[in-house]
Amino acid sequence: MIAKRNAKEISIWMKRAEVRPSDIALQLGVSRSLVSATINGRKNNRRVLAYLEDAGCPERFLRLPEDMRRGR
């Protein structure tokens, strides 16, 4: 089951950090729709989630899958 992400807070964080979904897609070589679906919780793409986490997006917004959580 895919965890419910806080897409609104992720979007706010992205605007403040000047991170755009199209930039993530280009950097990772994936579609923008995959980035959007991951942010909105319809997909669980680990590369997109790792990118957001590494860029500084708070884990509490991302609701990472258990095997991706730090501090385990």
Image (tube, rainbow, N blue to C red):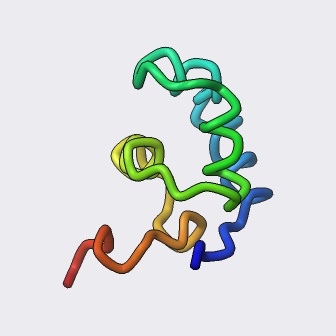
User: Quick one: quadrant of the N terminus?
Assistant: bottom right
The image shows residue 42, relative to residue 13, as above or below, that is: below
Q: Quick check: 11 left or right of 68?
A: right
User: Quick one: quadrant of the C terminus?
Assistant: bottom left
Please give the name of the residue rendered at 73% of the width and 55% of the height, measured from the top-left corner.
40
How many marks are shown on the rendered structure?
0
Q: Nearer the viewer, residue 1 or 18?
A: 1
Q: Quick check: 36 left or right of 68?
A: right
Q: Quick check: 4 left or right of 2?
A: right
Please give the name of the residue rendered at 37% of the width and 49% of the height, measured from the top-left corner.
50
Q: Nearer the viewer, residue 68 or 9?
A: 68
The image shows residue 18, relative to residue 49, as above or below, that is: above
- The residue furthest right is 8
Please give the name of the residue rendered at 43% of the width and 19% of the height, measured from the top-left corner.
29
Q: Quadrant of residue 5?
A: bottom right
| Residue 35 percent location from the top left of the image | 61, 37
Please give the name of the residue rendered at 45% of the width and 69% of the height, measured from the top-left corner.
64
| Residue 52 percent location from the top left of the image | 46, 45
- The residue furthest top is 26
- The residue furthest front is 1
- The residue furthest bottom is 72
Q: Quadrant of residue 62?
A: bottom right
| Residue 39 percent location from the top left of the image | 65, 51
